[in-house]
Amino acid sequence: MGDFNTCLLKGDSRSRRFRSTAESYNLHILPLAATHNIPDCNPSLLDLMLVTVPASVSKFGQCAADAFSHHDLIYLSYKLRPPKAKSRTLVQRSFTKMNLDCLRKDAQAIDWSVVTVPDSIDEKIDLLNSLLIQLYDVHAPLKTIKVKHLSAPWLSDDLKDPIAKKNRAKSHFNVNSSEANRAKYQIKQNFNKKQKPTSKQKKNGKTKMH
């Protein structure tokens, strides 16, 4: 879509070569009237729209822009179906229902002194990790979950980072509801509201931390 600097109203070799090239790539040229008009010159068709599936075109056309250009403005509405998001399988631990008292009891029963036996620091770390994983396997075992609903396509990394900072500020406020923590959280919250393309929050007249 744009100015291809080749007038298709002419039956010269240049226009024929352009049409042949478009056809070889399975591209269809949408029909338009002359799009370039200069006083005392013949109109020309320079601005073109090429598509692969004409049936997916819902609307197209042109309109004059004499106030600022000799070219017409061309427009196109194309029906596109976003690809269906594929589900993902994740393996993770859940710490939400972990019994901390039982965890402490089992941790105290472990002989942690064995970590000091190896001379190599790498072996010490491997041994420590092994003991910790044994604890986690008992109190927070690995679970396989299938994620069907992925993040919204507009939720880019530039938005995820401020959201994560807002969530951390919320956690700090929940632990210590001081005015300083409240102010920090509200700053992060207001910034996120401005960044999101749409706001799903509804005001209900009550003060509530979301």
Image: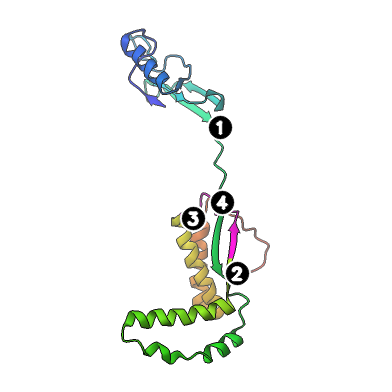
- For label 2, the SS is loop
Q: Residues within 10 Å of mark 3 (few under 14, many from 20)?
A: few
The residue positioned 60% from the left and 58% from the top of the image is 146
Q: Quadrant of the C terminus?
A: bottom right
Residue 79's disc is: 1
Q: Evaluate if marks 1 and 2 touch, with contact meaning CB atoms under 8 Å apart.
A: no
Q: Evaluate if marks 2 and 3 touch, with contact meaning CB atoms under 8 Å apart.
A: no
Magenta residue check for 148: yes
Where does residue 177 sit, x and y in percent of width and height? 56, 79
Where does residue 193 sit, x and y in percent of width and height? 53, 58
Between residue 107 and residue 69, name the one nearer to us: 107
Residue placed farthest to the top in the image?
11
Q: Amino acid at mark 3?
A: Gln
The residue positioned 35% from the left and 22% from the top of the image is 4
The residue wearing badge 4 is: 198
- For label 4, the SS is loop
Where does residue 188 sit, x and y in percent of width and height? 49, 65
Q: Quadrant of residue 200?
A: bottom right
| Dot placed on the residue nearer the N-terminal end, 2 or 4 | 4
In the rendered view, would you say 55 is above or below 89? above
Q: Residues within 10 Å of mark 1 (few under 14, many from 20)?
A: few
Q: Which residues are magenta?
A: 144-156
Q: Amino acid at mark 1?
A: Lys
- For label 1, the SS is loop
Q: Label the magenta part by its dominant secondary structure.
A: loop
In whole angstroms, how far apart are the C-alphas of marks 2 and 4? 19 Å
The residue positioned 42% from the left and 14% from the top of the image is 34
Q: Quadrant of residue 207?
A: bottom right
The residue wearing badge 3 is: 195
Q: How is the image coloured?
A: rainbow
The residue wearing badge 2 is: 209
In whole angstroms, how far apart are the C-alphas of marks 1 and 3? 27 Å
